[in-house]
Each structure stands twice: as structure tokens, then as C-alpha cells.
Image (cartoon, rainbow, N blue to C red):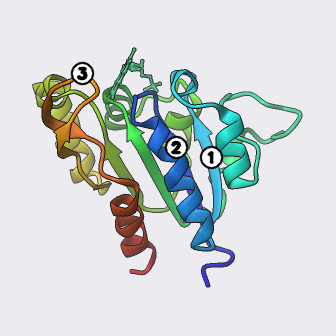
Amino acid sequence: MNDGRSVLLAVGGGIAAYKSAFLCSRLVQCGYEVRVAMTHSASEFIGASTLAALSGKPVAREVFNTDRHPLGPHIELAEDVDLMVVAPATANLMAKFACGVADDLISNLFLQVTSPVLIAPAMSSAMWQKPSVQRNVTQLSEDGCHFVGPETGWLSCRVSGEGRMSEPEDILAAAEELLNR
Ligand SMILES: Cc1cc2nc3c(=O)[nH]c(=O)nc-3n(C[C@H](O)[C@H](O)[C@H](O)COP(=O)(O)O)c2cc1C
């Protein structure tokens, strides 16, 4: 059905990273080839083994991996990608994307992919409302990135507010909308 189409799932270091496992599984069930990259912070929230098993591929974390990716993981994993999905997108990752910083694998991949990019932010309301974060969101929208969420709802800091990552099914729907354009 979607055989041969590739989604690069980039997982940032927020509490919502646990939901990226479900998103990964749903993308696989929909027939996409899913390549997963995660930040070191994301490893604090979800194990690489979970994402590797669900995607059926090794999970990439390092900028340098000459044994597996002699050309560089950021080159090989970005090749022929139909969509990059960043979920959860941390304030830190969005700041790097907005400024062109490339000091970890995901920020390098962001610069390398030629596909559309779908960003699913997740953070506390205080972080989300910070002028710097909003500036970066505006910049990334102007740069052509697509956003899904964040939603208003229960946050892990034990309050309700804006900043909750969209549910995996909603991210999947937004991803498919872009993939089918
Ligand atoms: C328990 C906990 C939860 C966190 N949740 C978030 C979050 O939801 N969003 C966010 O932007 N940062 C969150 N952070 C902070 C990030 O982990 C931190 O900014 C980190 O540097 C992000 O790294 P990365 O962007 O490379 O993944 C959290 C930190 C902790 C300790």
C-alpha cells in the first residue's frame, strides 16, 4: 500500500518520547519504511531497543558511525526520505532547526533531508509560551516546516495547559496528509 515510501522518525528528549513508540508502530503498520533517529536525551525517556524492534531497523543516535554508515548517518538516513517527522520536537531541537545548528544527528538530518518536515512540539506551557520558542516556530513555519499541535491538555508537570504533544494517531493523519499531497 505504502511500500517503498520512507518516513524518518526523529525522536527528541521530552517525556512524550514514549508516544513515539506507538507512532513508529502505526507508521510501520501503514506500510512505510520507518527509519528512527533519536537524541541522547531521548534515550532517557525511551529505549532504543523498543524503537529498533518496532521499526525493524537499528536506531541511529550518533553523528559518526563509520562501521554502519561510512558516508555519515545524516547522509545515508536522509536518502530518499519521503517525510521527516520530529516527534516529540523539543524546544532545543526547534531552536537548532531555526538557526541551522548541526551539532547532533537529528539537527544534521534536518539540514540534509529534501522532503517535507512535520514537527510535533511537546513541552511545558511555560516553555511553549516563551517568546524565543514562538519566534523559532514562526521562523520554521516561514521556512516551510509543517506543524501538528501542540494541544492543550494534561502535562507531565501536573498541570493542564498548552504544550501537550498531539496524539500519535493525529500525527499519523498529518503525516499521511503530507505524504499523499
Ligand atoms: C523529566 C524531563 C522532561 C522533559 N520534557 C521536555 C519536554 O517535554 N520538552 C522539551 O522541550 N524539553 C523537555 N525536557 C528538557 C530536555 O530534555 C532538554 O532540553 C534536552 O536538552 C533536550 O535535548 P534534545 O533536544 O537533544 O532531545 C525535559 C527534561 C526532563 C528532565
Q: Is residue 60 visible?
A: no
Q: Quadrant of residue 61?
A: top right
Dot 2 amino acid type: Ala
Look at mark 2 in the image and give the residue it sits on: 10
- The answer to whether the residues at label 2 and label 1 have Cβ atoms under 8 Å apart is yes
Label 2 Cα neighbours within 10 Å, binned few <14 / some 14-19 / many ≥20: many
Above or below for 87 versus 168: above
Label 1 Cα neighbours within 10 Å, binned few <14 / some 14-19 / many ≥20: many
Q: Is residue 97 visible?
A: yes
Residue at x-position 65% and y-position 52%: 35
| Residues at marks 2 and 3, CA–CA distance in whole angstroms | 23 Å
Of callouts 2 and 1, the N-terminal one: 2
Residue 8, image x and y in percent?
57, 54
Residue nearer the viewer, 90 or 103? 90
Residue at x-position 28% and y-position 51%: 143
Q: Residue furthest bottom?
A: 1
Look at mark 3 in the image and give the residue it sits on: 157
Dot 3 amino acid type: Cys
Which quadrant contains ligand 1?
top left
Residue nearer the viewer, 18 or 150? 18
Residue 24, image x and y in percent?
56, 54
Of callouts 2 and 3, the N-terminal one: 2
Q: Quadrant of residue 19?
A: top left
Residue 164, image x and y in percent?
25, 40
Q: Secondary structure at mark 2?
A: strand
Residue at x-position 63% and y-position 73%: 31
Label 3 Cα neighbours within 10 Å, binned few <14 / some 14-19 / many ≥20: few
Please identify the quadrant where the N terminus is shown: bottom right
Look at mark 1 in the image and give the residue it sits on: 36
